[in-house]
Amino acid sequence: MADEDPQTKAREFALGLLSKRLRSTAQLTEVLLGSGYDSPTIRSTLDYLARCGYLDDERLIQTTLERARRESRGSLWLDQCLQEQGLDGLNANEARASFAHEEVTIAKTALLGRYAQPLSHADARRAGQYLGRRGFGADTVETVISQYVVSEN
């Protein structure tokens, strides 16, 4: 094993990283560069991993979207995750746009799972903070909360 070529070492190293969790092309590139592999070796490794189906940024974007839906997270959370994963291309932008259409529904699900309706004004404030911590933007929070607050009469 000690006399393996750099290409084989890079592939094995990258496969080891991918066996622990999905990673983006940008994340793997950064780790491989930090581990001392040269650009041609990295390009070749990434091409190999993509051809074999181990490296797929679109699948990672879809997995992140599914997690946001499953965990009732908002678009701010989604944006942060995609940026941390180095997923800023056209596919990520399309995912953000499609998610925006679902965000109010997801926020309602999060709210209804946590608070009884209708909301008092005190509960509305706490519910808004809760939704904000889950990564929903101010406009979404306001839209959702306004539908469940007790009116003052």
Image (cartoon, grey):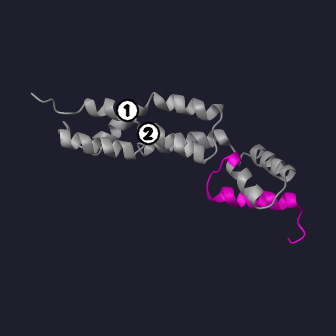
Q: Position of residue 97 (x, y in %)?
A: 53, 28
Is residue 67 or residue 121 the one in the foreground? 121
Where the C terminus falls, by quadrant?
Answer: top left
Pointer 1 local density, CA inside 10 Å: few below 14, some 14–19, many at least 20: many
Residue type of the residue flagged with mark 2: Gly
Crowding at dot 2, Cα within 10 Å, few <14 / some 14-19 / many 20+, comes out as many
Q: Confirm or deny contact between disc 1 and disc 2 (CB under 8 A).
A: yes
Q: Residue at x 56, y 33 (%)?
A: 95
Q: Would you say residue 16 sits in the magenta stretch? A: yes
Residue 134: % across, % down:
40, 45
- Decide: is 11 above or below 3: above
CA distance for labels 1 and 2:
9 Å
- Residue wearing tag 1: 140
Q: Secondary structure at mark 2?
A: loop
Span colored in magenta: 1-26
Specify whether 68 is left or right of 60: left
What residue did someone put label 2 on?
Answer: 74
Give the quadrant of residue 64: top right
Question: In terms of secondary structure, where does tag 1 sit?
Answer: helix
Q: Quadrant of residue 132?
A: top left
Main SS category, magenta section: helix
Give the image location of residue 120, x and y in percent: 17, 39
* Pointer 1 or 2: first along the chain: 2
Q: Quadrant of the N terminus?
A: bottom right
The one nearer the camera, 90 or 44, is 90
Three-letter code, disc 1: Thr
